[in-house]
Image (cartoon, rainbow, N blue to C red):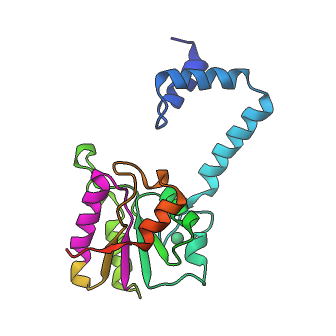
C-alpha cells in the first residue's frame, strides 16, 4: 500500500488490540502530521514502559520495583486474596475502595478456543502462594463472561481441598463484558454482595 516506513508503522499499529486497518492508517497519518515533540514524548513513554515496568514477583501486577505498590503496603490485610485476570482489573477494583486485601493476577482467563489453558496462566503460582499463606478467603473476580466463569469454576474446584472460603462477585455486573467496564458503584456493590461458591 504505502512505502517502507509508513507501511511498517501501519502494520505495527494494526497489531494492537482494538485497532483495525482503517484506524491504524488514521493513527499513522496523524503521527506523520504531529508535532515532533509530541511524537518524541510518545516514543519515550513506550521505551520507559518497556525498560522500567515489570511484573510484581508476588502478585504479577505491574510494578516499578520488585514488588508492586499493593504488595508493599503494610496496611493491607493478608487474609483475603482477590484473583483477577489482568492488571487493569486491579485498577478497577482499587477505584471502588471496597477491598483492603491483596491480589493475584492470572494473566488472562481459560479459553479453549484461543488455546489458553491453566498452564498458560499463573495458576501454579497461585497455588504455591496459598500453600504458605495466611489467606482464609479467596475472592474470584474474573470477568463476567464465558471465559471468566470457566476460570472461576476451575479455580474453585482446584482450591476446594484447602478449606478456604471461596467467593465470586455478585451478579449485577454487565454480563459478557470486562470487569473494567463496570462503574465503581456497581463493582463495589458486586464486591460487597459476593457469594460463597461451593465446588
Ligand atoms: Zn504485587
Over which residues does the magenta segment extend? 136-159
| Whole-percent x, y for residue 17 in the image | 46, 38
| Side of 108 where 58 appears, left or right | right
Q: Is residue 9 above or below residue 61?
A: above
Task: Specify whether residue 28 is painted magenta.
Answer: no
Towards the viewer: 50 or 174: 174
| Mark count | 0
For the view shown, which residue lies furthest in the bottom direction? 134
Quadrant assignment, res 151? bottom left
Residue that appears at 62% across and 50% down: 49
Image point (64%, 44%), residue name: 46
The image position of residue 43, as x and y in percent, is: 68, 39
Q: Position of residue 115 (x, y in %)?
A: 25, 47
Residue 166: percent from left, percent from top:
31, 77
Q: Is residue 11 visible?
A: yes
Judge whether 1 appears above or below 32 on screen: above
Amino acid at each position: 500500500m504505502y512505502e517502507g516506513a509508513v507501511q511498517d508503522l501501519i502494520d505495527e499499529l494494526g497489531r494492537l488490540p482494538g485497532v483495525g486497518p482503517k484506524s491504524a492508517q488514521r493513527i499513522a497519518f496523524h503521527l506523520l502530521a504531529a508535532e515532533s515533540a509530541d511524537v518524541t514524548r510518545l516514543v519515550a513513554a513506550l521505551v520507559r514502559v518497556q525498560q522500567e515496568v515489570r511484573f510484581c514477583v508476588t502478585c504479577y501486577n505491574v510494578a516499578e520495583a520488585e514488588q508492586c505498590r499493593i504488595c508493599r503496603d503494610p496496611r493491607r490485610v493478608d487474609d483475603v486474596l482477590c484473583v483477577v485476570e489482568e492488571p487493569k482489573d486491579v485498577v478497577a477494583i482499587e477505584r471502588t475502595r471496597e477491598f483492603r486485601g491483596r491480589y493475584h493476577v492470572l494473566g488472562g482467563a481459560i479459553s479453549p478456543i484461543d488455546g489458553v489453558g491453566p498452564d498458560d496462566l499463573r495458576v501454579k503460582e497461585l497455588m504455591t502462594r496459598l500453600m504458605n499463606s495466611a489467606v482464609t478467603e479467596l475472592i474470584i473476580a474474573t470477568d463476567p463472561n464465558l471465559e471468566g466463569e470457566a476460570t472461576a469454576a476451575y479455580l474453585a474446584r482446584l482450591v476446594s481441598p484447602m478449606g478456604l472460603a471461596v467467593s465470586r462477585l455478585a451478579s449485577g455486573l454487565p454480563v459478557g463484558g470486562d470487569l473494567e467496564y463496570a462503574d465503581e458503584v456497581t463493582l463495589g456493590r458486586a464486591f460487597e454482595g459476593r457469594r460463597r461458591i461451593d465446588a
